[in-house]
Image (tube, rainbow, N blue to C red):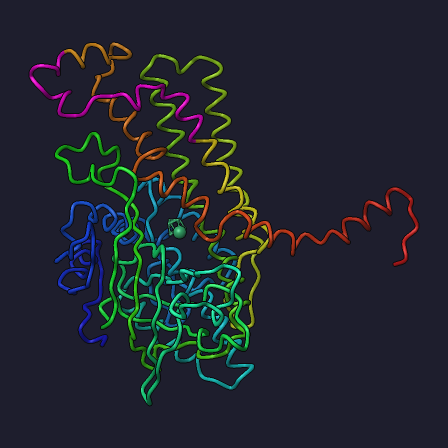
Amino acid sequence: MWSQFKPIVTGDDYVESLRGRNLTVYLFGEQIKEPVDHPMIWPSINALKATYDLATDEPELASATSHLNGEKVNRFLHIPHSAQDLVMKNRMQRKLGQITGTCFQRCAGLDSISVMHSITYDIDQAHGTEYHPRFIRFLERLQKHNQIIAAGMTDPKGDRSKAPHEQADQDLFMRITDRNENGVFVSGAKAHMTGGLNSHWMMVLPTMRLSEHDKDFAIIGVVPLQAEGLTYIYGRQSCDTRAMEAGDVDKGNAQYAGQEVLAVFDNVFIPWEHIFMDGEYEFAAPMVERFTSYHRASYVCKTGLGDVMVGAAATIAEYNGLEKVSHIRDKLVEMTHLNETIYSSSIASAHESKPLPSGAWINDSMLANVCKHNVTRFPYEISRLAQDLAGGLMVTLPSQQDFESEETGALLDKYFKGREDIPTADRVKILRLIENMTLGRNAVGYLTESMHGAGSPQAQRIQILRGMNVDQKKWHAKKLAGIQQVD
Ligand code: SF4
Ligand code: FE
């Protein structure tokens, strides 16, 4: 399997590595021959390419020393072995958010290998299995080839009131359908697969707590994207077809976009060497909980996008000649305050991280959940303020073609001018960027993904409720109030 992969060094190597894989991909009801060349798909590949380019341009930030062999590896393939590793991960994510202005699709994969390090270790301790050394062998190869792994976590789930084994259609949660001496076969689907087409491997993991009756659903393994039996159906994004129009201006951010796909598994084979859980259902709940501790802190990525939003709002204010007006400055302060509040909870969860028995370090769960919960709200308010500063023009602007037309170009240039020394075209471009991030294609990444990615708001509230230790807080209050306490 591995011999067919050439190790990736540069971002260009990465793009080349995606070609010719003959994946079964559908978009607009048709099968796509080569996703890499599709104008709607390419910007999402470019966002992942940035994760390779950053490792070359700023190795201290985006690469790390592998704990396996001391080699330099991309930070997205590095298992955190200290609080500083998690701090650096967060800083890298903010930076990539600034560079791309969108979801760069690589964090769930990193968080899945991070959680596998400790969960395989714990299963082996409990059951005498050999998942951990098996996982380490896979990780070594993944690091050596510098490939991307995506996390397939979200099952379609069907009737939410029913457990996996109770569903009328058993394929609504990924399950083992058959097995032989070499491995197992799985069927089902993984939804909202971030970067699902742009990766080399996909790790499938249970999406929630499982019981003894759900043993056949307790499967964790990795498959190459081109595995037989896999079909991908591309998810739409608001205004995505602008990517297929001529000209870059109306796209707002022509270079970068996110990607989500539905990945359907029809009896896909997973060999033993790529299986890291097979029936140990009682480890599904701790696995999900640890994954969320990592992944909810990963949503620090949105502070990088927030930086872009603050910058765009400040720029349009300047182009309108309003940058010194006090309420405008105050709105920029408010946006920054919200953005840095997200950052503080994430970076604190990294600083407060702790080691697990396997040696991997994990973010503080409470602070990671607070980070993600902030992310479900603050980008909406930041976007509202950016739209406030942008003005209505953002949604009534004519097209790039009209700005370039002989008949209308001069008129639009004249009437859409702001400050005299600023070209009208620049004013239009910054408005299109705000449109892109608050209403258009990258609003998927900045807003809706902020709401629902890594668990919808209620999922964080449940974790906050579990960890908030009200009894201890009551004890402190009663003590100060002079109320006699039993202990
Ligand atoms: Fe990474 Fe953020 Fe995209 Fe999730 S939403 S993959 S954390 S960039
Ligand atoms: Fe996500």
Count up the numbered dots. Answer: 0
Is 72 part of what is drawn in magenta?
no
Residue 209 at what x, y percent from top left? 53, 67
Quadrant housing residue 248: top left
Q: Which quadrant does the N terminus fall into?
A: bottom left
Residue at the (22%, 66%) spot, across then down: 7
- Which residue sits furthest left? 406
Q: Is residue 406 magenta?
A: yes
Query: Image height check: is 355 above or below 246?
Result: below
Horizontal and vertical percent for residue 149?
32, 63
Secondary structure mostly seen in magenta is: helix
Please tell me which residue lies in front, 403 or 84. Answer: 403
Residue at 54 percent across and 81 percent down: it is 125
- Observer-nearest of 73 and 249: 249
Residue drawn at the location 57% of the way across and 56% of the way down = 365
From this viewpoint, which residue is outermost toward the front? 168
Q: Which region of the structure is painted magenta?
A: 383-410
Q: In which quarter of the image is the C terminus?
A: bottom right
In this picture, residue 362 sits left or right of residue 406: right
| In the image, residue 285 above or below residue 316 | below
Residue 364 on image: x %, y %: 57, 55
Residue 299 place in picture, x, y as percent: 45, 48
State the residue at coordinates (30%, 62%). 263
